[in-house]
Amino acid sequence: MRLIDRYLLRQLMGPVALATLALTAVALLSQSLAGLDLIVNQRQSALVFLKVTLLYMPQLINLILPIAVFVAALVALNRLHTEQEIVVCFAGGMSRWRVISPAIRLACTVAFLALLMNIFVQPLSFRTLRQELFEVRTDLAATLVREGEFTEPTPGLTVYAQSVDGQGNLRNLFIHQIKPDGATTTYTAEQGRVGRAQGRPVLFMTNGTNQEFSSRGVLNYLTFDEYIFDLAPLARADELIHYKPSDRYLHELFFPDLQQDWERKNRLDLLAEGNARIASPLYNIAFMALALNAIIGGGFSRLGYGRRIATMGAVAAGVRLVGFLVQSGAEDEAWLNVLQYLVPLITIWAALAQIFRGKVSRHIDITKRPLQLADRAGARA
């Protein structure tokens, strides 16, 4: 790669990296606000909250990358063109392709990285995320008790705890159970904690009482130092983790096990997701081509390129919206999967065709900073 090519590439790489980091941070902030339920209602630790938030990152980055490429390319190219550095390149005899090739190579590299994330990283992270959420959902300590509230985790069972500390210890515990035969049992304890005994989930209670009123009207009362309350009937042992299309690897999307009822009924959904995984990285190249078209697709203007940038921004938003609509439609009609590839490819072709059809300005405006422009032309030609 020649010196001028490396210079143009460096001018683009910095803004792309910064834009990706900034937009990812905003998306993570939004995702973290939505995940606060894990701490507030499910009483999970901050580590679980952070892990769940970070596991969303591969999908967030893939959605953000085309936008980051488009915004960063506009910023970098607009500066280069406004300061007439691109004009200097054309005046030095560089072809159109030579000028835009660093940007296209960068977009192709980003698209390749996005493809790797779609194929390998996203399903791995989403499977881990699904397992983490499954453990949170089946966490008996979180579902059994709400601090300071009477809860009914299952019909006939009422549970109350005055407070729950950070280690999961329940203070001033109250349990009222109505059995199928009509007998009622009431437990009170100074302290309780969910754990396991002989492989079964149980509630260890200490320093409490047990009052049982049988269906025949007999009252039994006892005190205990420690009592083990069986929670196995509350545990949904038959519940399994179900992987959604976004959690599956590429071969599972294109070649599902059609002997399974769910896979057979959702065959088109899996096929649409698989094609979207391969087609979506193309939007990085398409958005880079649109950014190049906004700046280089027309003549040089000292008044700026606000109108062209706004037009290409609207086109980029429309193209991506059409892509989402096509993916949604492909879940009902398999032939629409072809359009998932055609939408970004046609955008790339149209943007590049406009660039190569436009007139190249090889005239350097030296009315501003003539000495600086002359130095730059001599140093970078």
Image: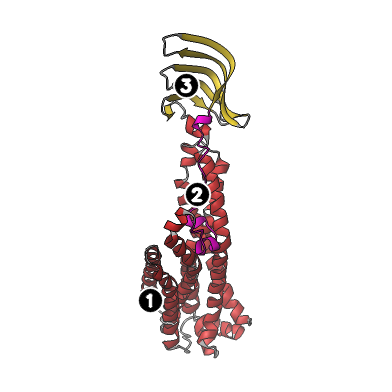
Labels 1, 2: front one: 2
**Residue labelled with disc 3:** 175
Q: At label 1, which amino acid type do we have?
A: Arg
Mark 3 or 2, closer to the camera: 2
Residue toward you, 353 or 23: 353
Q: Which mark is residue 308?
A: 1
Residues in magenta, as a range = 231-258
Residue type indicated by callout 2: His
The answer to whether residue 160 shows anywhere in this view is: yes
- Disc 2: which residue: 242
Per the image, label 1 sits on a secondary structure element best described as: helix
Q: CA distance from mark 3 to mark 2?
A: 33 Å
Q: Indicate the amino acid at tag 3.
A: Ile
Taking the magenta stretch, the answer to whether it contains residue 161 is no
- The residue nearer to you, when weighing 360 against 130, is 130
- Label 1–label 2 contact, CB within 8 A: no
Earlier in the chain: of badge 1 and badge 3, it is 3
Quote the CA–CA distance across marks 1 and 3: 69 Å
Residue 285: % across, % down: 49, 73
In the rendered image of this protein, does residue 313 appear above or below residue 204? below
Q: Specify whether 190 is left or right of 330.
A: right
